[in-house]
């Protein structure tokens, strides 16, 4: 039953790459700016401390 | 009018956008799971294409969003050029990478669909070519905007590029009607009854909603980052650190 | 909205309108080149001398019913491509796409021989924008046919 689902009627080699690449690229598009903003905030905070000292 | 004026203040905008992160992320995850389950499991196989048609559930949302995001960018570019709203520039910059991703995914999933059904990965017909031009417009904007920013000039030229490129959007949409192409006509249209049965349609609409949430989420995260970069030295940024 | 904003909007609209008009002219001039294929009727209408053997062209149409002949033991296939008006015999050797069948829209790429046979290098299937499970599609087809009969 589950095997039948993953076979996708013989179109598995087209459908699964299409779905997985879509999900991976979209996830990267969310993860990357989150990481960047976190770093930016850290940098700004560090700079602020440097000035205050 | 009061709320608009408030939204124009960067610190207020930064806070409001922060409140949108959780709802849009939740919407994206829930709709994505529901749409994928509906499209890959619940929807019946197509009478012509069998299970191969299921690529539609990742292809059409990408293609639709690639055009929607560009239209939004044209609107932001208009606001930035005419009213010199700095936040519009932030939104413009924040939209480009995710828009380019949608255009790329539309081409890639279309290619993976075309190979088994049409018999080719790629053909230079009007629809595929105009979508490729859209991807180049996104990339061109990103490169130009980056170059302008690094040389410290204002972003009028890159906004102009976005506005000029908006001519491509109706061309993409109507290409399958104006010219003969290998690509089929639109299945979803604002004016006609959808050419797709209900059991196959609802997962597609749910996936469309999921992709819109993803765009919203990326826009919010990136806009907040752009606002921080812009106001780095202001008192309110120092306040939140 | 003050005077400056108005002026900027006018300038922008002027530039964009000009560009849109230019684009329209280009696309109008190129309209035949943007089309992917000729229909059989369009090709028949062209003076026969213009389409020569050494020119690669594409024809788009339907695979005529009961016209597919496969040669036994090879990948060679012959069929007629039609748009209801004109039709051309097509010869092709190679793997056909999954959707290739009678009545299906196809685009064939190749050369038109002097004897009128189209020697295809590539056969691409075209599908329509309708999606439905097998049973329902037949019901819809029957319903539209009945509606046509009634009308």
Image (spheres, grey):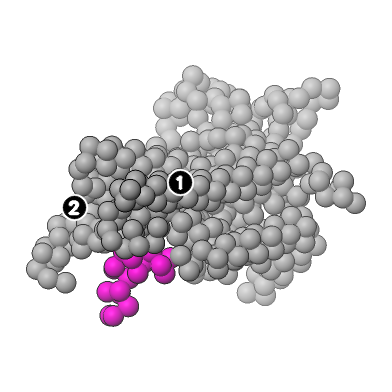
Quadrant where the C terminus of chain B lies?
bottom left
Most common secondary structure along the magenta stretch: helix
Which residue sits furthest right? A1
Q: Vertically, is B1 above or below C11?
A: below
**What residue sits right under mark 2 in the picture?**
C15
**What residue sits right under mark 1 in the picture?**
A39
Q: Residue at x 21, y 41 (%)?
A: B152
Which residue sits furthest bottom? B2
Q: Are marks 2 and 1 in contact (CB under 8 Å)?
A: no
In the image, which residues are magenta?
B1-17
Which residue sits furthest front? A53
Task: Tell me the subunit letter for badge 1.
Answer: A
Q: Does the magenta stretch include residue B2?
A: yes
Quadrant where the N terminus of chain B lies?
bottom left
- On the question of residue B168 being in view, the answer is no
Q: Distance between the residues labelled 2 and 1?
A: 41 Å
Element type where label 2 sits in the image: helix
- Where is residue B110, by image quadrant? top right
Q: Where is residue C38 in the image (x, y as percent from the top left)?
A: 49, 39
Q: Where is residue B133 in the image (x, y as percent from the top left)?
A: 40, 41
Task: Tell me the subunit letter for badge 2.
Answer: C
Q: Position of residue B124 (x, y in %)?
A: 48, 36
In the displayed structure, does residue B230 sit left or right of residue B209?
left
In the displayed structure, does residue B140 sit left or right of residue B197?
left
Closer to the camera in the image, C47 or C105: C105
Label 1 Cα neighbours within 10 Å, binned few <14 / some 14-19 / many ≥20? few
- On the question of residue A8 being in view, the answer is yes
Element type where label 1 sits in the image: helix
Label 2 Cα neighbours within 10 Å, binned few <14 / some 14-19 / many ≥20? some
In the displayed structure, does residue C55 sit left or right of residue B4?
right
Q: Residue at x 44, y 48 (%)?
A: A42
Q: Does the magenta stretch include residue B213?
A: no
């Amino acid at each position: 039953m589950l095997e039948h689902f993953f076979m996708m009627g013989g179109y598995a080699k087209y459908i699964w790459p299409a779905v997985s690449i879509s999900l991976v690229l979209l996830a990267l598009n969310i993860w990357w700016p989150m990481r960047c903003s976190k770093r930016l905030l850290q940098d700004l905070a560090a700079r602020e401390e440097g000035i205050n000292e | 009018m009061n709320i608009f004026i408030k939204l124009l203040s960067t610190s207020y905008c930064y806070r409001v956008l922060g409140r949108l992160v959780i709802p849009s992320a939740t919407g994206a995850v829930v709709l994505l799971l529901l749409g994928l389950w509906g499209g890959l499991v619940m929807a019946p196989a197509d009478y012509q294409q069998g299970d191969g048609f299921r690529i539609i559930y990742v292809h059409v949302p990408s293609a639709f969003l690639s055009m929607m995001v560009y239209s939004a960018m044209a609107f932001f570019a208009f606001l930035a050029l005419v009213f010199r709203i700095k936040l519009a520039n932030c939104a413009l910059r924040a939209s480009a990478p995710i828009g380019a991703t949608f255009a790329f995914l539309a081409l890639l999933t279309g290619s993976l669909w075309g190979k088994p059904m049409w018999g080719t990965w790629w053909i230079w017909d009007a629809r595929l070519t105009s979508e490729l031009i859209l991807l180049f417009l996104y990339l061109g904007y990103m490169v130009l905007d980056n170059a302008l920013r690094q040389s410290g000039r204002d972003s009028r030229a890159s906004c102009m590029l976005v506005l000029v490129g908006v001519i491509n959007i109706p061309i993409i949409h109507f290409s399958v009607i104006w010219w003969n192409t290998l690509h089929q006509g639109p299945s979803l249209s604002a004016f006609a009854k959808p050419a797709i049965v209900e059991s196959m349609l609802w997962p597609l609409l749910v996936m469309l909603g999921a992709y819109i949430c993803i765009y919203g989420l990326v826009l919010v995260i990136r806009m907040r980052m752009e606002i921080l970069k812009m106001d780095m030295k202001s008192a309110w940024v120092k306040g939140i650190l | 909205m003050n005077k400056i904003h108005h002026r900027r909007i006018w300038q922008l609209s002027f530039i964009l309108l000009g560009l849109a008009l230019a684009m329209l002219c280009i696309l109008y001039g190129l309209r035949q080149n943007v089309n992917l294929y000729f229909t059989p009727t369009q090709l028949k209408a062209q003076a026969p001398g213009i389409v020569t053997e050494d020119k690669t062209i594409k024809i788009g149409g339907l695979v005529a019913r009961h016209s597919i002949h496969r040669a036994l033991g090879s990948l060679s296939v012959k069929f007629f491509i039609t748009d209801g008006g004109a039709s051309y015999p097509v010869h092709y050797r190679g793997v056909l796409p999954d959707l290739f069948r009678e009545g299906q829209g196809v685009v064939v790429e190749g050369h038109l021989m002097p004897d009128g046979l189209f020697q295809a290098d590539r056969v691409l299937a075209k599908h329509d924008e309708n999606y439905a499970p097998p049973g329902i599609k037949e019901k819809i087809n029957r319903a539209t046919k009945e509606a046509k009969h009634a009308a």
